[in-house]
Image: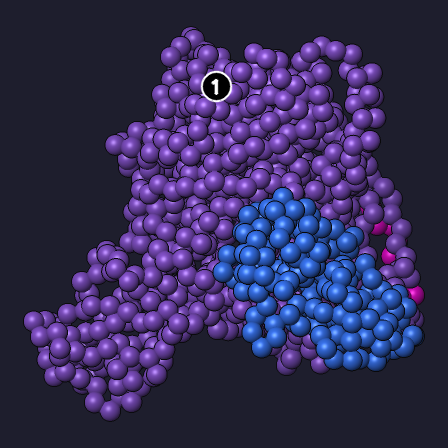
Amino acid sequence: MTEITVTVDGVKYADHVEPRMLLVHYLREVVGKTGTPVGCDTSNCGACTVLMDGQSVKSCAVLAVQADGANITTIEGMANGSLHPLQRAFHEEHALQCGYCTPGMIMAAADLLRENPHPSDTEIREGLEGNLCRCTGYENIVRAVRRAAEAGVSE
Amino acid sequence: MTAQTEIAPAPDAELGKARLRKEDERLITGQTNWTDNIKLPGMLHIAFVRSPFAHARITSMDVSAALTEPGVIAAYSGADFAAEQGSLPCAWPVTPDIVIPNHPPMATDEVRYVGEAVACVVARDRYAATDALNAIEVDYEPLPPVLDMRTALEDGSPKVHEAGNLSYDFLFTQGDMDTAFHDAPIVLERTYRQQRLIPAAMEPRAVVASCVGGEFTLWSATQIPHVLRVMLAMVTGIPEQNLRVIAPDVGGGFGSKLQVTAEEVLAVLIARKLGRPVKWTESRSEGNLTVHHGRDQWQQLRIAADSDGRIRGLEVDLLADMGAYLMLVTPGVPVLGAFMFPGIYKMAAYSFRCRGVFTTKMPTDAYRGAGRPEATFAIERLMDELATELGLDPLEVRERNWIKHEEFPYTTVAGLTYDSGNYEAATAKAKGLFDYDALRREQQQRRTSGDPVQLGLGVSTFTEMCGLAPSRVLGSLAYGAGGWEQASIRMLPTGKVEVVTGSSAHGQGHETAWSQIVADQLGVPFEDIRVLHGDTQVSPRGMDTYGSRSLAVGGMALVMACDKVIDKARVIAAGMLEVSAADLEWTPGRWAVRGDPDKGVTIAEIALATFAAHALPEGVEPSIDADATYDPENFSFPHGTHLCATEVDTETGFVKIRSYVAVDDIGKVVNPLIVEGQVHGGLAQGIAQALYEEAVYDDEGNLITTTLADYLIPSATDLPSYITGRTESPAANRLGVKGVGEAGTIASTPAVVNAIVDALRPLGVADITMPCTPERVWRAIQAARGGDQASAAEQHAARQSDQTQGNSPQGVARERGDAEQSGGAA
């Protein structure tokens, strides 16, 4: 077991974990952050995307021990009193149906807009290529990210 | 006794309003209650040992070593469940002599597909359970696999089951086929392949089971909590009243969670054995192996037509891969298609034959559209072939055959009565949105100039039967249950409303749409309504959600329950107002004295007075709550015209969808946002079948496409933006609604393939087997050109490997299946 210290959504946690434990299992089962779901076991679907020190990572492809000392933001840390503009845009553009991919999609979109605050539709599609959705056909997801960008999410 | 004979929306009506979804708040903030989120005190985790062989006899089994592994509480093999596990149910014996093999949730002596569960470990956590699987020793004697349904019925084929490889032979003939085909000026014969698909809902399956004092609770990522409860009782013998099934938030289904699974049954039995709650959550790789697959047919078709293109008759002969066992509705899926092959077209004769064939693969079952995409693909591909034969535009040959709008209601050759439709209107609208004539001109220019990128236009004028289903029809098809749906309205003392529905949503937005319907009916604010579903203790009766049935059936149950509430409220209002009930008049939200509208009481006031019950009329029960169960008279028949333009690079085989227009007639729309979303998502799945997805087994019966790196669910970059439109011919139910959940999937697959073939037809390509990967498209072009395929293929492969990466449509998963492609170009 290895001791790690991780800040998750603004709260500091110190835990002993197996070195092989995936970050997503640490978040879900040790910290109790079940807002981040698991959709595959090969890092293809992106449902488990979180921000690690501000950059999006697939938390099934990171070991908990690799997050030692890191600052993790999950979907549960996005709303700060009121919904994050991306959360609001996903709601307003009907960019989710079952909602399983949504946490990862929003976190990936946050990173996309951090890097490129005013992406074209093509850039949005390319930026979200690593996140799979089975319900929406992506059309409204693209609209939602565009809407959030227009609202100035990165500012 | 109310005046409500039909729904006349008021100016401020909820019906048709683009309400944002009530469901979203928990889904966008990470507060969702997925089954895998559930943690119960003392909960243990299950992991399964699964067969590595497609077909084998289990010769020895020893789980004992697993018991000494850290954190392991129990380990079981099939023998441990033999006395109690029963056989997984098949509810649709489509013929009297159908072969339904015994299907134990855990194999005991023989395995028949890779992934079939043979043993399990129950441990403190999922890591410990998985670790201990290695300690279980299983010996197998391999048996020959059966992998191709075309040879599985030949004499001498190895057998999947003792009774042989034929499950059933379903025949259905209408009209005089001999007359239709005898001397017909045009007879076309075609063979189409419906590849095997993996539904791949984003949420993997998960199950939690607990048993306390003989009372069981099962949480499952299921579409069908109600059906599952009944079936669990029947399979395990656990008294139904002691079983509670909960479908918490469910992350998509697309038919894959319309099932009674081995893991659900085993979790319940393990919880009983151990007296502790247990959880099992599948990995995606496990899910690709063991969540039922979809489609998988060979379709042999003959169509006879007059020289003006009018269809005389259609003959359909299917082989449908059942996989190793019959699951809940496995045999019924292709049979649902039996009624849809004639599509929107008039013809005098029709025959349908389907043989269900066992193979040593994962069973197939419902996948979005279930039988109807297969039928629609075939007839819409055939209509293009007919157009080519006649030298007509594909829309022209369709128009010569389709049912005219003034001919509704129309009983088709397959015996269905389509209640409404207007194919002319949908097609005209689609052509306008698509700019059909300009695209045809551009196509001609590219052909003339020999442009290496050719343009193709694909047409799909489809209909489908959904809103499953009239119970008497299901009975006549030997289905094991009815097709009704239930709803309850509970009027709370504060004037708020609880709506209980038997429809079990898993992403569709029922909580929002149901609130809109009830708000209109009862005249209460949208915000004051809460919709409850997905728990057999809260919603005791239901038939659940599949087959685009929720709105057309479940929505109508809501309307009927509201009628009863209003009727009951009338009697109490009469007492409150001290007038005769006959003198009262209903406007949504209020009973008032006819001719004296100021004298009235609101439904909220009536609810409070009913709660107090101090001064109710003599003999009136103190409740205005109501239940209703609706059994539809007929199916629902949405239709539409979808047009697809593809640019096909004849040098690389790459297909780009340049534009896609979907005009759908789904009757009245409750919530246009939700409808739009359903259409988009449906299109994505239909396009995915046309271009990207295929479940592939190797020669030994191993599934190759076990991950999302190999099974190519399209990403945002793989799909186009869609242009959608609607026309409206109201259905013959009081809401005027039709289903929309499957329409996009059913329509889009043939639209895309027709477009690709249309682009390449001048090169001599007449068909391409799905999925139409760059390699397959390229090979079809080469074959049509008669070039040296072998050397050209090598050059092409080299070029592809330079251009592509592993997770692109050209990747490794596309380097197979070419045996099925021979004859792809004619």
Residue name at image x 65 percent, y 80 percent: B212
Rendering coords of residue B201 (x, y %): 63, 53
Mark 1 neighbour density, 10 Å: few (under 14) some (14–19) many (20 or more): few
Rendering coords of residue B448 (x, y %): 56, 11
Residue name at image x 71 percent, y 56 percent: A115
Q: Colour of chain A?
A: blue
* Snapshot quadrant of residue B555: bottom left
Pick out the residue farthest to the left.
B595
Rendering coords of residue B372 (x, y %): 50, 38
Relative depth, front residue between B129 and B10: B10
Q: Which residue is mark 1?
A: B441
Q: Secondary structure under badge 1?
A: helix
Q: Does residue B245 sit above or below B811 in this rendering?
A: below
| Left or right side of B5 for B158 | right
Say which amino acid is labelled 1: Arg
What residue span does the magenta drawing correspond to? Answer: B57-66
Rendering coords of residue B694 (x, y %): 68, 38
* Snapshot quadrant of residue B399: top left
Q: Does residue B310 sit above or below B533 in this rendering?
A: above
Quarter placement of the C terminus of chain B: top right
Q: Colour of chain B?
A: purple
Relative depth, front residue between B780 and A93: A93
Determine the main secondary structure of the stretch shown in magenta: strand
Residue B65 in the magenta stretch? The answer is yes
Residue name at image x 69 percent, y 78 percent: B40
Res B790 seen here: yes
Label 1 resides on the chain identified as B
